[in-house]
Image (cartoon, grey):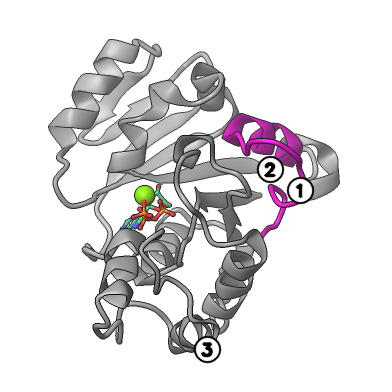
Amino acid sequence: MKIGILGGTFDPVHFGHLRTAEEVGEIFGLKKVYLIPSNNPPHKKDKYITPFKDRLYMLQCAIEGSDILDVLDIEGRRPGYSYTIDTLRELKSERYFGKNAEFYFIIGMDAFLEIETWKEYRELFRYANFVIVKRLGYNIKNIEDLLERLDLAYQKEENGIYHSKETKKYICLINVTFLDISSTKIRKLIREGRSINFLLPEKVKNYILEKGLYKDEIN
Ligand code: ATP
Ligand code: MG
């Protein structure tokens, strides 16, 4: 059983996340792609983050209408910082998907380039295949250079596909529909009183407006 995972702060979720998850799910024949909001992201320690329950609710609204997307609040149930390695370990335990689950961890180039700062990052590659997708301002060369430097014992098979004989895992760099949308951009538009139409699902937009999220400078 092939399972996709897209972790993030999702503050707020937008069409960049959703379309990426949906397309990767189709391309790799995944049974489901789980969007997993970080409860307490270690790399955003000094920043204000919208309460977990609001971000979770927006995600639940956002996936309506997709057969493949789903949301898991696994990090919301764990105290302390949310580390991906802990999540993958928990997901590997049989009570989630059984013994035969194969994980595809979806990640943008920007986030992947920071991977060395993640807890036990080398271990992550033992637990999941990685699917790396483009973000504005980053190119494949940055990623290839990093992979070389990390020296994780992957062999380059063909363009954008790396395979490890030892772990039997893949790293794939792929193109999906490129949407230059970020949560940072959406928060900024709201602060400036500008429109966020057509950047995220209508229901998410309405929740943001109803709750008055992202209006203050702290964001
Ligand atoms: P912020 O601007 O607050 O960092 P973000 O838009 O980058 O927000 P995150 O929650 O940080 O969203 O991202 C979660 C994951 O989704 C990361 O791996 C990120 O690279 C990826 N991602 C975010 N936006 C896009 C997009 N437009 N296209 C593809 N991947 C994306
Ligand atoms: Mg980000």
| Residue 205 left/right relative to 158 | right
Alpha carbon of mark 2 to alpha carbon of mark 1: how far? 6 Å
Task: Name the residue type under label 3.
Answer: Glu
Q: Residues within 10 Å of mark 2 (few under 14, many from 20)?
A: some
Q: Is mark 2 within 8 Å of ligand 1?
A: no
Query: Where's ligand 1: which quadrant?
Result: bottom left
Taking the magenta stretch, the answer to whether it contains residue 75 is yes
Residue 71 marker: none
Q: Which residue is mark 1?
A: 97
Residue at left offset 59%, top offset 54%: 36
The quadrant of the image that shows the C terminus is: bottom left
Alpha carbon of mark 3 to alpha carbon of mark 1: how far? 36 Å
Q: Nearer the viewer, residue 199 or 157?
A: 199
Q: Residue 167 in the image: state x and y as whole percent.
A: 54, 19
Q: Residue 171 in the image: state x and y as whole percent.
A: 38, 33
Residue at left offset 50%, top offset 38%: 45
Task: Name the residue type under label 2.
Answer: Ala
Q: Nearer the viewer, residue 111 or 65?
A: 111
Q: Which residues are magenta?
A: 72-91
Q: Which residue is mark 3?
A: 210
Alpha carbon of mark 2 to alpha carbon of mark 3: how far? 39 Å
Question: Mark 2 and 1 residues: CB-CB less than 8 Å, in contact?
Answer: yes
Q: Which is more N-terminal, label 1 or label 3?
A: 1
Q: Is residue 70 visible?
A: yes
Question: Mark 2 and 3 residues: CB-CB less than 8 Å, in contact?
Answer: no
Q: Which residue is mark 2?
A: 101
Q: Quadrant of residue 152?
A: top left
